[in-house]
Amino acid sequence: MASLFLASCAAPPTKPISQAPKASSSSNLPRTPRVTETVITDDSSSSAALTPVAFSEIPGWDEDNLSEAWQAWLQSCNTLRKRKPGPVNWAAVCDRANAQKPRDAKAFFENNFRAYAVRNQITGKSEGLVTGYYEPIIAGSRVRTDRYTVPLYAYPKAWVRTKPSPAPTRAELMNSNLLKGSEIAWVEDPVAAASMQIQGSGKIRLDNGQIMRLGFAGSNDLPFKSSAQWLLDRKEITRAQATMQGISEWAKRNPSKVQEMLNANPRFVFFRELPASSNQDLGPIGALGVPLTPERSVAIDPRAIPLGAPVFLETTRPLSNQPIRRLVMAQDTGKAIVGPVRVDYFWGTGDEAGELAGRMKQNGRVWLMLPKRD
């Protein structure tokens, strides 16, 4: 779901993530033996290695307001409790969560989970890349109008039976009639449309005030390439202008070059309309099948981190050393999210979240929480 529109344009922090402090001798939590284990996931090819740690050794654990992550955790439980019994007993810990008050979140996690520092057992590195993504919300229509002339497409019906291999590139799709009749919505700004494709979901605000929710329906399975980088390589914009607003402004000044710029990315994403929700503030549905929570949901590689699990993230805000240290839930995946220490941080919905997501390319570390065995 979560490829990045501007990932190549962001810079890493100016200094590395701080090292975790050692647990104090007065801690009420026992020091855990330094035994490295291999994470249990649904994929035996996992490259993640886990080292048990005390919660007091996780930087920022005591400072985070864990009650703010409680609703996101309960969302995870909506799916986790339905899993078949296995090495990890999610159902039992989720049942206990239902009887818990959010204000007691810290005690709940410490009493019911063990914490594990995650590292890449192939490279030995415990620090990896943290990017960001978001849910666009743009004005649009269900039908083409004089204002809304840029289409978003449903998955081609012909591809359901037989998908071409290799599938056409974006340029080939745009220069043919292959998608005619598959229009699902119309918007005004081609850059905003491309951004929604890259994020994999979004909201269309119709002129009558209603919200049309679109979710990921499939793609042409071609690799993503940054349109922003294409502009930078041709010196069409500066790095300071490599934001969605900056690219939209460039597009307004250069309408004859817009399609060439967008076609630099061969990947093409299709949508499906999601059921209307009484709560329009709900985030998009992630790979776990539950709504994402701004700044408390992340996309991970499910071959390394169990989908749905609580994860403590240490990173920094975009283009800064201002720390982000908080409990998040592994509720989504993405084609570009590969490896045990690789996280895509969900910033939320709208332009402000989009600006933060587009600039985020930081170093980070993660700690996985797994239920204690009964």
Image (tube, rainbow, N blue to C red):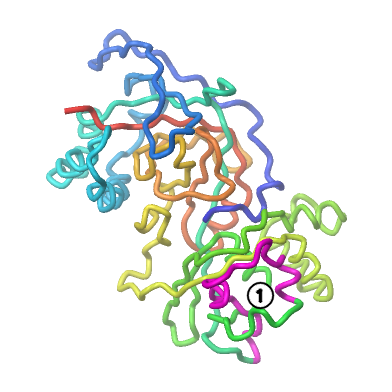
Residue furthest to the top: 25
**Span of residues in magenta:** 146-174
Residue 35 is situated, as x and y percent measured from the top left of the image, at 37, 13
Q: Considering depth in this image, is 220 or 322 the residue closer to the camera?
A: 220
State the residue at coordinates (26%, 37%).
86
Q: Residue at left 65%, top 36%?
A: 12
Q: Position of residue 191 (x, y in %)?
A: 68, 68
> Which of the 4 image quarters holds residue 182?
bottom right
Query: Residue at 62% of width from left, 41% of height from top?
Result: 361
Q: Please give left or right for residue 181 compared with residue 38 in the image.
A: right
Position of residue 41 measured from the top left corner of the image (x, y, whole percent): 38, 36
Q: Nearer the viewer, residue 238 or 55?
A: 55
Q: Residue furthest front?
A: 162
Local secondary structure at mark 1: loop
Which of the two residues, 332 or 193, is positioned nearer the viewer here? Answer: 332
Label 1 amino acid? Asp
